[in-house]
Image (cartoon, coloured by chain):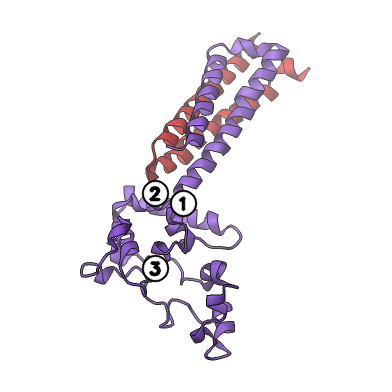
């Protein structure tokens, strides 16, 4: 467990203990000093602890381990280890083109205002369905909206391999079309192998990735 | 006297909500699963919100403090 989380837990428990004392003896808050103590303990500390805890939980919810902890996502986790350079998520994961610890989030967030919040709301919906509904079969899971090139361009825009790529520059209209999201990186027959669960059984896997 | 007692009751209620909310949040931080995130936000967050609102209400409705 990260040291920061342990420190936050200690602070949260300390705050709970101080508030517990004030709850048992509310008479303490009658005097001026008691009122100041109560304000700090019952207003400032809970807000501070809540924000710290929320930030910690949000950070954890971005991790690959967090996403793959649901049974439904197991096959998606396996697809990151497929030994095939044309398999887009696998090549990104294995070559550290995305942070390995935040592989899912790096590609499936939205690099726009409130994009992170929007995908976390989707995530809450997923957890709710997982525990209280009927989760779909892994191969039936679809994106909420077509994959936007913006997410690819967040990293690749300006990169030499992207800007000077032979295929990207074969036609002068291609690069502007990619950049304006008119020509999809994924569904235009170029980088279209993403989480190919249908062929996962017969696939060869990168052993060192386990 | 009666209003002070009422204020104390409100502060006690707010304190209990806040303390339980904080304990739930601490447990969720230790329990690293997706459901912990929901419990953290839904239960811990709700209890803390109730506690904060009741505490603020107790403070502003206290006639002694208002003098």
Q: Earlier in the sequence, mark 1 or mark 3?
A: 1
- B28 or A29, which lies in front? B28
Chain at tag 1: A
Residue that mark 3 sits on: A91
Query: What number is the disc on residue A62?
Result: 1
Q: Return the residue nearer the eye: A67 or A30.
A: A67
Label 1: which secondary element: loop
Q: Which chain is red?
A: B
Eye-nearest disc, 2 or 3? 3
Q: Is residue A129 above or below residue B65?
A: below
What is the x, y in percent for residue A198? 26, 71
Residue at the top extreme? B1
In contact (CB < 8 Å): disc 1 and disc 2: yes
Do badges 1 and 2 share one subunit? yes
Residue at left offset 51%, top offset 36%: A4
Which chain is disc 2 placed on?
A
């Amino acid at each position: 467990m990260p040291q920061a989380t342990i420190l936050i837990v200690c602070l949260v428990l300390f705050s709970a203990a101080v508030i517990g004392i004030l709850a048992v003896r509310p008479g303490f808050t009658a005097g001026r000093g008691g009122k100041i103590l109560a304000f700090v303990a019952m207003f400032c500390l809970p807000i501070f602890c809540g924000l710290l805890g929320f930030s910690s939980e949000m950070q954890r919810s971005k991790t690959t381990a967090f996403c793959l902890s649901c049974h439904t996502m197991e096959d998606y986790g396996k697809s990151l280890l497929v030994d095939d350079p044309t398999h887009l998520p696998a090549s990104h994961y294995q070559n550290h083109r995305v942070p390995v610890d935040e592989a899912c989030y790096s590609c499936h967030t939205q690099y726009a205002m409130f994009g992170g919040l929007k995908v976390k709301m989707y995530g809450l919906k997923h957890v709710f369905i997982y525990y209280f509904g009927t989760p779909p079969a892994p191969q039936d899971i679809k994106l909420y909206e077509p994959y936007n090139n913006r997410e690819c361009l967040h990293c690749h825009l300006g990169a030499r391999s992207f800007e000077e790529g032979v295929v990207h520059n074969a036609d002068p209209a291609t690069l502007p079309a990619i950049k304006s999201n008119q020509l999809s990186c994924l569904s235009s027959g170029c980088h279209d192998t993403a989480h190919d669960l249908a062929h996962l059984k017969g696939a060869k896997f990168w052993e060192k990735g386990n | 006297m009666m209003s002070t007692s009422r204020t104390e009751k409100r502060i006690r209620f707010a304190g209990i909500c806040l303390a339980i909310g904080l304990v739930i949040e601490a447990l969720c931080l230790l329990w690293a699963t997706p459901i912990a995130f929901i419990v953290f936000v839904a239960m811990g967050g709700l209890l803390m919100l109730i506690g904060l609102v009741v505490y603020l209400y107790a403070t502003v409705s206290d006639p002694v403090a208002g003098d």
